[in-house]
Amino acid sequence: MNGILLPLILVLAFVVVMLVVQSLAGAVFASRDRSKRVNRRLTMLGQGLEQRQVYEALVRRPVTPKLGSAWATESFERMTTFLAQSGLEISVMQLIAFTGAGALTIWMLAVLVFQRAGAAVGAPEMLVALFGALILSVLGAYVFVSGRRAKRMKQLEAQLPLALDIIIRALRAGHPVISAVGLVTEEMGDPIGSEFGLIVDETTYGAEFREALKSFAQRTGSEDAHFFAVSIGIQSDTGGNLAEILANLAGVMRARQTLAKRIKSLSSEGRMSGLILSALPIFLISVIGMMQPTFYTSKFEDPIFWPTVGVIMALYLVGLLMMRRITNFKY
């Protein structure tokens, strides 16, 4: 009897453990799927925040500091918009601080390597190493932020036709426009769910629907969002069947996305070649400046060095513009 009981207990224990593990895994995956379906705006509202607080947190428009020149102020505002479009929850000053900290860290590591190797490190070498570390840090920050922005933009433009389909069905069912837009905020995830929720919030606070759509287009930077805002504006002025207009617009957006994917697949080799040829010289100059600063500092006193640097920089910029014109397609 004991010989049968022990294997039976082991089998039952195995079954119980498997059921517990399966239940825990199901709960974890279900909560993860739910977090993917629910957008940030609904999550923040569910946490007890007021609608105005959620709007202020998602829009994130900090006060532009007084920088003393119109160009600097405009550049700061562009960087703020660029960060907002990437979906990162940091400010421009925080990004600058992180980039500077990264540059200092790389520079100190390079100086430590010089000292370990027993190389003579003077003020010119340390400045060149610092310049190379700063370029690498800025280049890395730009690649990271622009990659996040491109990913978010691609996701938003892929969701926009689906959002228009929801609005079209709601309009044909008799809902008003703002109510139809509100359905998108409840049915779709980020980024389109939260962005449409901001449209609803702006109209709730007294802004016109056309102005809220204009803010949406400017905030996201998407061409399809601009088309959507312009279509609503024209329909408001001229009248017509809004559901039919949005249906045609959704078809145009899907056709543009199909064309864009085809163009990107056909031009992928040229675009990658242009990217490598554009980034490789800056990367190599920065690495050499950090690892072997004497390679440049030993030539500083040569009278032909700085004119040569100027000519090379001019040729590099010309080549950069030419490659951009070749690989930048309008569709």
Image (tube, rainbow, N blue to C red):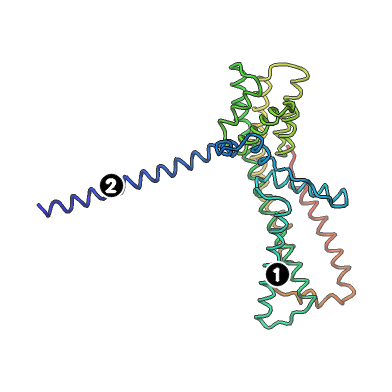
**Residue 232, x across and y down, in percent:** 72, 24
The mark that comes first in sequence, 2 or 1, is 2
Q: For the residue labelled by badge 2, is the local secondary structure a helix, a strand or a loop?
A: helix
Residue type at mark 1? Trp
Residue type at mark 2? Val
| Residue 318 visible here | yes
Specify whether 26 is left or right of 16.
right
**Residue 111, x across and y down, in percent:** 69, 75
Furthest toward the left, the residue is: 1
Q: CA distance from mark 2 to mark 1?
A: 56 Å
Q: Which quadrant of the figure contains the C terminus?
A: top right
Q: Residue at x 25, y 50 (%)?
A: 13
Q: Residue at x 61, y 19 (%)?
A: 175
**Quick check: 211 above or below 295?**
above
Q: Counting other residues with Cα less than 10 Å from the Cα at mark 1, is it few (<14), some (14-19), or many (20 or more)?
A: many
- Which of the pair 52/328 is nearer the observer? 52
Q: For the residue labelled by badge 1, is the local secondary structure a helix, a strand or a loop?
A: helix
Q: Residue at x 66, y 76 (%)?
A: 113
The residue labelled by disc 2 is 16
